[in-house]
Amino acid sequence: MYHFSPFPFAEASARFRPVHLPIHHPDFRYPESRNPYWKKLQSFAGKVFSDNETERLRGSWRQAFPQAAAGGRLHVEIGCNAAHVLLEWANRNPGDAYIGIDWKYKPIFWAAEKAAKRGIGNALFFRAHAERLHYMFGPGEIDRLYVYFPDPWPRKKQWKNRFVTVETLTAFAPLLKADGIFHLKTDHPGYFEWMEDAVARTSDLWSVLERTDDLHQGHPDPTKLAIPEVTLFERLFIRDGLKIHSLKLQPKAPPPVSFRA
Ligand SMILES: C[S@@+](CC[C@H](N)C(=O)[O-])C[C@H]1O[C@@H](n2cnc3c(N)ncnc32)[C@H](O)[C@@H]1O
């Protein structure tokens, strides 16, 4: 039957127009990438997960680690870059499971390549936006979460890009186990103040276990510290004489549900 539309062009363009949902939307789809490393990452099937694939095993990532012990901890590092620290941890603790997340293709490729060369089987890598962490992991799935030296976005008009916010702290708190720990480090005093302010505004969700403005105070020569005691960026900051700010958080138990008779 002939279908008459008074606005045939409008209808057609609406049908074929790609829908770009904001990154925080549950139905957000990563756009197809032209980055040459996007294809290269596919050669690490089962070890590297990209884009919406990183959300497929939400709540059951432990099943992707046949080598890790049943009671092993799940560690997640946001902004792992080429996984310098994460691979050392994984190598030293074969009973634990490690997931490194970075939005850059090339460092994730290098990380996966190094893991394969060194035969490290208890590390996986996600090429994804860590803002979507709560779509990647389920409640109580993570034992240890790390954000080391997130980009500080120092200028006021850039602050909107900062990763640690009331929104991320609120979305991530339920992902940790009751005895889980979220460890943050930065060299940037302004960003540290910003983080502490976000923590204060989510104090119903997080307790502060430890905080310091000078993590390596008392060390005879912090420039001698090596990976994984310090990260790649941390080593550079220490050499520049910058102090390392550190914050360890633990999720608070949600209040008990009260029933009215
Ligand atoms: C300053 S580097 C720090 C790298 C490493 N943590 C260290 O301390 O050596 C920040 C890293 O976070 C990654 N990154 C920044 N924003 C991100 C996001 N929203 N999701 C995933 N990775 C992100 C960057 O690609 C970069 O590798």
Image: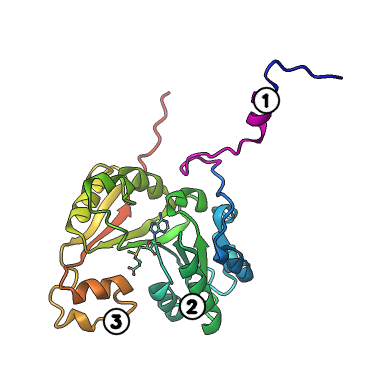
The residue shown at (42%, 61%) is 143
Q: Disc 2 marks which amino acid?
A: Pro
The residue shown at (31%, 55%) is 250
Q: Earlier in the sequence, mark 1 or mark 2?
A: 1
Q: Residues within 10 Å of mark 2 (few under 14, many from 20)?
A: some
Task: Please state the quadrant of the image where ligand 1 appears.
Answer: bottom left
* Label disc, if present, on residue 94 of the rendered structure: 2
Quadrant into which the N terminus falls: top right
* Label disc, if present, on residue 42 of the rendered structure: none
Cα–Cα span, label 2 and label 3: 20 Å
Q: Earlier in the sequence, mark 3 or mark 1?
A: 1
The residue shown at (48%, 56%) is 141
Provide residue 247's location: percent of width, then percent of height: 24, 59
Does residue 72 appear anywhere in the picture? Answer: no
Residue matched to label 3: 226
Cα–Cα span, label 3 and label 1: 62 Å
Residue matched to label 1: 9
Taking the view exactly as shown, the residue that stands out farthest to the right is 1
